Amino acid sequence: MRTRPLKVALLGCGVVGSEVARIMTTHADDLTARIGAPVELAGVAVRRPGKVREGIDPALITTDATALVERDDIDVVVEVIGGIEPARTLITTAFAHGASVVSANKALLAEDGATLYEAAERHGRDLYFEAAVAGAIPLIRPLRESLAGDTVNRVLGIVNGTTNFILDRMDTAGAGYSEALDEATALGYAEADPTADVEGFDAAAKAAILAGIAFHTRVRLDDVHREGITEVTSADLASAQRMGCTVKLLAICERAADGRSVTARVHPAMIPLSHPLASVREAYNAVFVEAAAAGQLMFYGPGAGGSPTASAVLGDLVAVCRNKLAGATGPGESAYTRLPVSPMGDVVTRYHISLDVADKPGVLAQVAAVFAEHGVSIDTVRQKGRPDGDGEASLVVVTHRARDAALSGTVEALRKLDTVRGVASIMRVEGE
Amino acid sequence: MRTRPLKVALLGCGVVGSEVARIMTTHADDLTARIGAPVELAGVAVRRPGKVREGIDPALITTDATALVERDDIDVVVEVIGGIEPARTLITTAFAHGASVVSANKALLAEDGATLYEAAERHGRDLYFEAAVAGAIPLIRPLRESLAGDTVNRVLGIVNGTTNFILDRMDTAGAGYSEALDEATALGYAEADPTADVEGFDAAAKAAILAGIAFHTRVRLDDVHREGITEVTSADLASAQRMGCTVKLLAICERAADGRSVTARVHPAMIPLSHPLASVREAYNAVFVEAAAAGQLMFYGPGAGGSPTASAVLGDLVAVCRNKLAGATGPGESAYTRLPVSPMGDVVTRYHISLDVADKPGVLAQVAAVFAEHGVSIDTVRQKGRPDGDGEASLVVVTHRARDAALSGTVEALRKLDTVRGVASIMRVEGE
């Protein structure tokens, strides 16, 4: 057992950072035993130095993060400030000065992971980021290591707790989107500016990270097709319920059937109530991984929050410290397949389309012809006149699987039909 | 990239071994890229050399496993023969000759893991065994590494697919135990001699492994309280259904509330239908892990079978090869807490007790008094006369949480009451 401590610099001391610092203090003996050497908090970079931080020696607090990561005695930098800059520069500087890095920064990893990986590689250091996706749920390590001898074909999951909470409230309490968002904000599940969550940016960043690791290729945020939940209505939830489904914001990463390309997307989708993801409530996360040999695996747990995220950070900290003591590094970037990312149009999926149509003979035939022209096969149609008998009817069509480009082309063509008064809702159907 | 291949010796070429060999061949390029060097199958030890093994060079086949593990050019030995001997001697010999070991041998790890860990440690080699518990489900690595900075308080799961299949059939098809066992045997879920599964030995071995890793202490098979499913009846399942529960064979590892001891046990238990484990069907496995910071995590997937187990073996093979190239080793035994394993009597649980009693006034008071004498508090009682009106009634008692010793003492005392004609069933209630 080495007695000289490994030195840790903490960048950021908010909800996650303060919990990391707390556990490092309260569980120092456990961490020492598990690492094989003591770990010592050597500095904490913050924006607001005046704030009282219980349990943290005020002498460790600094506002000069750059000076902290430039110290040559730092073994591991824990980055929990988030965002692109200054995080990126701080991390690459840390590598250049000999530190390994544990990060929870999904936005940066999705935007420019390659720069971080390359800096880690160049300096022979570790870059670990279990906390960047799905909080405490072990997902990065299982994909990077446990499934390293297998071929992952699909990752499908709920990776954003805020939107899951909102959709869950819309589903179970019949709330409208705004009402459910207000509730999420009041309970602290949604931030004051909920854009990153409700527009799907957060989930898309996670999808990019997961797809890159799962398929051993580079996937960036821009490669991920993204649709948020702001246009999901109570009527969509009601339609889903009539189909024995619910609506979830899913992140879906797939290897094409021919194995030559991959896709990554985030959008709301109907999934059957019988699917395990349908019963993921409130702000929980759950991710399915389908691999050639392993079959279908599911990982479930709290997807965010200070303590769960700190758990993931500390697991990485132990691993990185162990590597440092062994003079080794863990897995780096694995992007050898160089599989290209195909656009959304190439994704094969199913649509649930709800149309407002003129209530007269021949409309169904006309609509069906449009589907046929686009090579889209119809699974079921439900047609009914409106209760108010105003000469309009609704037509709900669920398609068989087809390329998304064909499906969206069908919808565009339907919009142009005289007899179609409007497209009330379009939603993909997944998980069958 | 190193071009000289790492040499792998395979001990055993049954369902799992042949799949490991197959994937090593078909996915050689992927493995090379992920490891950083090619891996080569250097020898395969089998019992029946005459059997045709598709895709395996007959020149690699040997019946002399000892000579194979004594070869000094072997980098990794993959042991998938199972059982205590000769597996133990082969593994320790492999370490002594410089190889690291990947094993799927739960029985040996639970019986005498310490000997293996010590041999690995002494020779500076890796011992990895993800495949020993819950097939392809990443569980050992998350516990050993992802949660290395957290405090695990509880592991609760379904870790035996055979018994889960049987109980699922009894629950959903109303089958009796023998009938369900026959079906499991016919479908290949149960072996010709199902003892290891139905008597809980397999699950108990897994519980010992999980408890040791989760609590950083040594837990052996003998430390695990074990009850199988052979005495579970259709009536138990019916009782469970009346309570909104089902019956599962659970492996439960817990840290005592004061943190000073641990328990590990395997027994059938009623769990509420609302609990995620209740919906684990057929031969699937699922494990809950509760940790102080991470909260409640669940891992789900196929718990057995050639391909899933091979996936876990190959993930370990990649990790061990990477370590070897880096001149490092992964995590070894972590048993520093030296927490003792308490006996079953110290476990705090709830009982569901079904009694046949005389149908006369005062019986409930007498029964309730016995519970009170043992300090066991009753949650609910359901009393009813038998339809045949033969002067007997049944009394179903569900207790609050109490020490198992107090609960079993209560049952013993109840058996001695004149008015209690028999104890129709006793089952613990978990997952609430």
Image: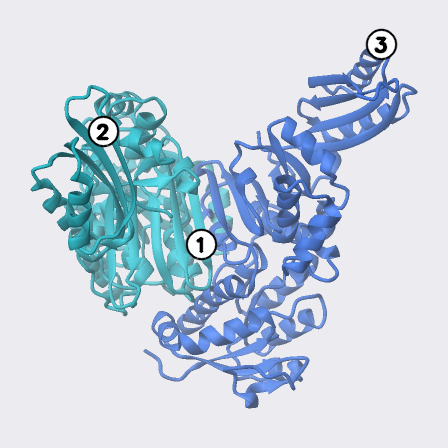
Chain colours: A cyan, B blue
Question: On residue B146, which mark appears?
Answer: none
* SS type, badge 2: loop
Q: Chain of mark 2?
A: A
Q: Amino acid at mark 2?
A: Thr
Query: The disc numbered 1 marks a residue on which chain?
Result: A
Label 2 with label 1: CB-CB less than 8 Å: no
Crowd around label 2: few <14 · some 14–19 · many ≥20 (10 Å): some
Measured as percent of width and height from the top left, residue B77 is found at 56, 74
- Label 2 vs label 1, nearer the camera: 2
Residue annotated with mark 2:
A233
The residue sitting at 31% across, 62% down in the picture is A215
Marks 1/3: CA distance?
55 Å
Q: Is residue B396 above or below residue A42?
A: above
| Farthest-out residue, right | B418
Instruction: Determine contact: label 3, label 2, CB under 8 Å.
Output: no
Mark 3 burial class by Cα count in 10 Å: few <14, some 14-19, many 20+? few
The answer to whether A327 is drawn above or below residue B54 in the figure is above
Q: Nearer the viewer, residue B209 or A164?
A: A164
When asked about the image quadrant of residue A173, the answer is: top left
Residue A413 placement, left or right of B384: left
Dot 3 amino acid type = Gly
Q: Which residue is mark 1?
A: A296
In front of the other: label 3 or label 2? 2
Q: CA distance from mark 3 to mark 2?
A: 60 Å
